[in-house]
Amino acid sequence: MEFKNISIYFHWPFCESKCPYCDFNSHVRKEINHRQWLLGYLINIENWKKKLPHSKIQSVYFGGGTPSLMNPRSISIILEKLYKNFLLSDDIEISLEANPSTVEKRKFKDFSSIGVNRISIGVQSFNDNDLKRLGRKHSANDAIKAIDIAKSSFYNVNFDLIYGRQFQNLSEWEKELEFALSLESQHLSLYQLTIEKGTAFKNLYNAGKLEGLPSQELSRRFFITTNKLCKKKNFNSYEISNFAKNKFECVHNLNYWRCGNFIGIGPGAHGRFEYKRSRFSYKNIMNPENWLEKSLTSKNPIQKLKEISRLEQFEELIMMGLRTSEGINLNNIEKKTDISLNMDKLDYLKKSKFVSLKNKNLHLLTKGKLVLNKIVNELLT
């Protein structure tokens, strides 16, 4: 029997507070019934086992929201359920997102003891004033302590930083990133601040009240400096915003970017999977209470389920694959979709030094990474 590799994502939709830049499906609640939420996740695992019985799990990811607010015992029971219902990869990666608050740091060893082997800490900044602007509840010192504790508990430690922040200059970011690199984690996720629709920052921006954002030229310099400093410290830029030491790339996220099979469990979680030679996408109900109610009453919590056409698969393979340093293999894409890229456009992009194309392997050069969205649009139109 052939088993298909899959990744499983669990979305915990709750946070202590809502950050002004965040467009994720996260919510603040005074009370949370942890027992009911655990049961909701377990019921969904049972349902997916029935739909995809011949699957091997290569990665599990607890995201949010702030999943480190979950009880370690709940995560242990979820993992046990997966172990009993699915075949597991020998080197399975189990990730959990956390915030560097005092309460959560005490949980790190508990999470490690139940099988979590990769932690991702939402640091965002080592500048206390900027942390306040970003709506974060921790201090820079809290973050440093959390990273130190995490390194003693987990095989693979990542932390996130946001750059291109309000009133931030290039020299300040260089010093901050050099400090971050000196902390000797295995992975860094480094994102330029983006103003997303539906966020408090977007409302301020529309009202002309979000001051100190970088110019386009300064944003370009931020990006180039980030890549140079990480390369100098042997952090491979294996995706536009993700950097890792050798063999510490995030298995779970690579599966997304390679358009693999993944199951999303929880409010607003997405999934992609192959079934009887067709590929499907789905999205769960966004509202946490509605999702939980549907799950507990054995009703389908999925809001949208559709078969993905070959053209849509083609577009997804281009959009996701070009984010990675490995890029895309045109032969593989043509084999999967029976669709080819326009060679005249590829020749133009190659001559303009936006992309490299060798032996049907296409990937972005630095110049192309700076205008990723424009390159993708050019290739798909």
Image (cartoon, rainbow, N blue to C red):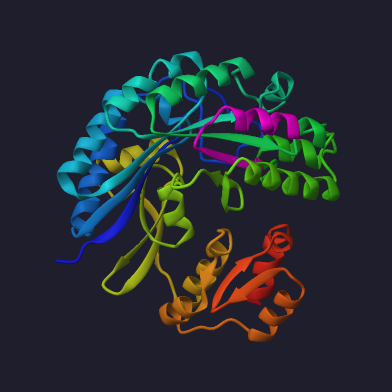
Does residue 103 appear to the left or right of 368 in the view shown? Answer: left
How far across and down, in percent of the image, does residue 228 sit? 70, 46
How far across and down, in percent of the image, does residue 196 sit? 67, 45
How far across and down, in percent of the image, does residue 284 sit? 40, 49
Compared with 214, 240 (above or below) is below
Between 230 and 305, the residue placed more toward the observer is 230
The residue that appears at 23% across and 57% down in the rendered structure is: 55
Quadrant placement of the C terminus? bottom right
The residue that appears at 42% across and 81% down in the rendered structure is: 335
Q: How many marks?
A: 0
Q: Place residue 303 in its image quadrant.
A: bottom left
The residue that appears at 32% across and 66% down in the rendered structure is: 274
One can see residue 251 in this view: yes
Q: Place residue 324 in its image quadrant.
A: bottom right
How far across and down, in percent of the image, does residue 243 sit? 56, 45
Residue 185, magenta (yes or no): yes
Region in magenta: 174-191
Does residue 280 appear to the left or right of 319 in the view shown? Answer: left
Quadrant placement of the N terminus? bottom left
Compared with 241, 367 (above or below) is below
Between 267 and 144, the residue placed more toward the observer is 144
Between 169 and 167, the residue placed more toward the observer is 169
Compared with 68, 376 (above or below) is below
One can see residue 194 in this view: no
Residue 35, magenta (yes or no): no
Compared with 175, 338 (above or below) is below
Does residue 203 appear to the left or right of 83 in the view shown? Answer: right
The residue that appears at 77% across and 35% down in the rendered structure is: 204
